[in-house]
Amino acid sequence: MRLKGLGLAIDDFGTGYSSLEALQRMPFSTIKIDRVFVAARTQSDDLLAIVRSIVELAQALGLATIAEDVEDAAIADRLADMGVGGLQGYLFSPPLPVEAFVAWLTERAHQ
């Protein structure tokens, strides 16, 4: 897949079945930081330290990072300052069906 320009992301990193072992054995290109560590309602110094560590690990392994469940601009700015490369969440848009997403994307491309 990588030879064809496609990447593979490990979703919900830091919880469930995502693990450091998975990073070692699979050719991931992106780590998606689980919402548990990102959501505004759960921000704490400990969680921010975990996010910083995940970003540093990803950078050391040459992987991109995406933070899930970004709900407000303050958290988006904090994550960007930490080096998180991509953000997703309700700050930008709720989940959309394909047709609505294409319309949403097209509208922003013409702004």
Image (tube, helix red, strand yellow):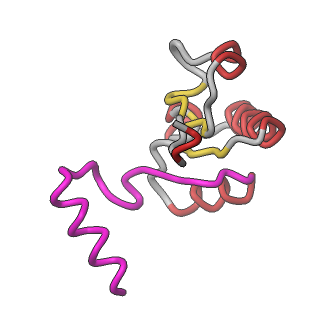
Q: Name the residue nearer the viewer: 45 or 64.
A: 64
The residue depicted at 55 percent of the width and 19 percent of the height is 15
Q: Name the residue nearer the viewer: 36 or 88.
A: 88
Q: Name the residue nearer the viewer: 80 or 22.
A: 22
49 within the magenta span:
no
Determine the image quadrant of residue 31. Answer: top right
Determine the image quadrant of residue 29. Answer: top right
95 within the magenta span:
yes
Give the left or right position of residue 22, taking residue 68 as reference: right
The residue depicted at 57 percent of the width and 40 percent of the height is 2
Counting from the top left corner in percent of width and height, residue 10 is at 54, 29
Q: Please state the extent of the stretch shown in magenta in the rendering.
A: 83-111
Give the left or right position of residue 33, taking residue 59 as reference: left
The residue depicted at 64 percent of the width and 54 percent of the height is 85
The residue depicted at 24 percent of the width and 59 percent of the height is 101
In this picture, is 99 found above or below 49?
Answer: below
Query: Residue extending furthest front?
Result: 3
Counting from the top left corner in percent of width and height, residue 79 is at 65, 52
Give the left or right position of residue 66, taking residue 23 as reference: left
